Image: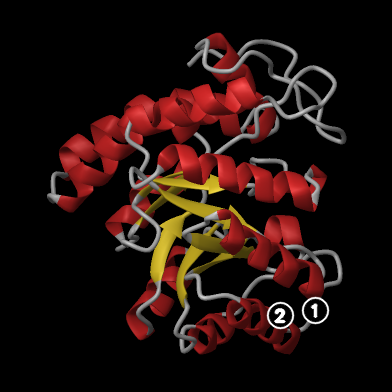
Amino acid sequence: MTDFGTNLVAMVTPMEPGGALSEPGLTRLVEHLLATGCDGIVVGGTTGESPTLTDAESAGLVGAVAAQAGNRARVIAGVGTHDTATSIRRAREAEAAGADALLLVCPYYSRPTQDGVLAHCLAVADATELPVMLYDVPARTGVAMAPSTLIELAGHPRIRAVKDAKGDLFEAMTVLSRTSLAYYCGIDGLNLPYLACGAAGLVSVVANVAADRTAELIRAVRRGDLGSARAINDSLLPLTDTLMRSGTGAANAKAALVELGIIPSASVRLPLVEAKTAVPA
């Protein structure tokens, strides 16, 4: 867990109207996340609109967040793409920019076999000295990481965690029982059951606006206070429903952050479109 933290946020990428990156928005957002209890910041992941970021923008964001966070939080750089060579290049650039760890999504669009998934992940893990969190999200990639693949990848000394957005709790418990991989819930609606099943922490979109409450949820489960954990989870359900089930998480989270006065604009890059109404937080 020290590789990645426990209360991780899938950070949005603040942008100005028209799509340029917002440096003031980024600075205010990072301070907000640190102040509300994030000990891990995922930069350039799905919620950060990674497919629209250039290599230079991705590395620049990692460097800026790492410099600002210092030793207050781990910085995990999203480097996965559909192309192994590009993913390796982004991993090396993230390492040079100051990332503490990498988030590596299953390669998308090409729909590789499990042998291809395995070879891709091993190649990226071999490319730097950073610890790797695998990102299993078949709804976006079209390919799931099979349990046998995860178990084999766990043998690599730098592959140490999984962000699970698959939602199969039995499979997660099975892999947990057979490996030393740390599991992180990547579906905000399932944070409580994943923690109860032994997840090390969360990679949360909702934490952009409610990291204090996701931190409380983690603490309650860890001390075995499931009554309090359920109450905290219940308090988060309306926000989770609004952010994650009524449109695009990235756009909705930006709208909520504007409502809170954290970032100046809810702008996103196409093909995403800005949330039409402000999201209450």
User: How many residues crowd mark 2 within 10 Å: few (<14), some (14–19), many (20+)?
Assistant: many
Residue shown at 32% from the left, 54% from the top: 195
Residue 176: mark in rendering: none
Query: Considering only order in the chain, which callout, 1 or 2, is on the residue closer to the N terminus?
Result: 1
Q: Are marks 2 and 1 in contact (CB under 8 Å)?
A: yes
Locate the N terminus by quadrant: bottom left
Question: Up-down: is 11 above or below 44?
Answer: above
Q: Secondary structure at mark 1?
A: loop
Q: x, y percentage for residue 176?
A: 37, 75
Q: Which residue is mark 2?
A: 120
Q: Which residue is mark 1?
A: 112
Q: x, y percentage for residue 166?
A: 57, 60
Q: Secondary structure at mark 2?
A: helix
Q: Quadrant of residue 102?
A: bottom right
Q: x, y percentage for residue 103?
A: 57, 61
Question: Up-down: is 240 above or below 56?
Answer: above
Left/right of residue 6 with respect to residue 116 in the rendered view: left
Looking at the rendered image, the disc whose residue lies closer to the viewer, 2 or 1, is 2
| Residue 204 seen from this side | no
Residue shown at 53% from the left, 48% from the top: 42
Residue shown at 79% from the left, 27% from the top: 20
Three-letter code for the amino acid on which mark 1 is drawn = Pro
Residue shown at 63% from the left, 42% from the top: 61
Three-letter code for the amino acid on which mark 2 is drawn = His
C-alpha separation, residue under disc 2 versus residue under disc 1: 9 Å
Q: x, y percentage for residue 78?
A: 62, 55
Question: Up-down: is 219 above or below 246?
Answer: below
| Residue 256 seen from this side | yes
Left/right of residue 269 with respect to residue 114 in the rendered view: right
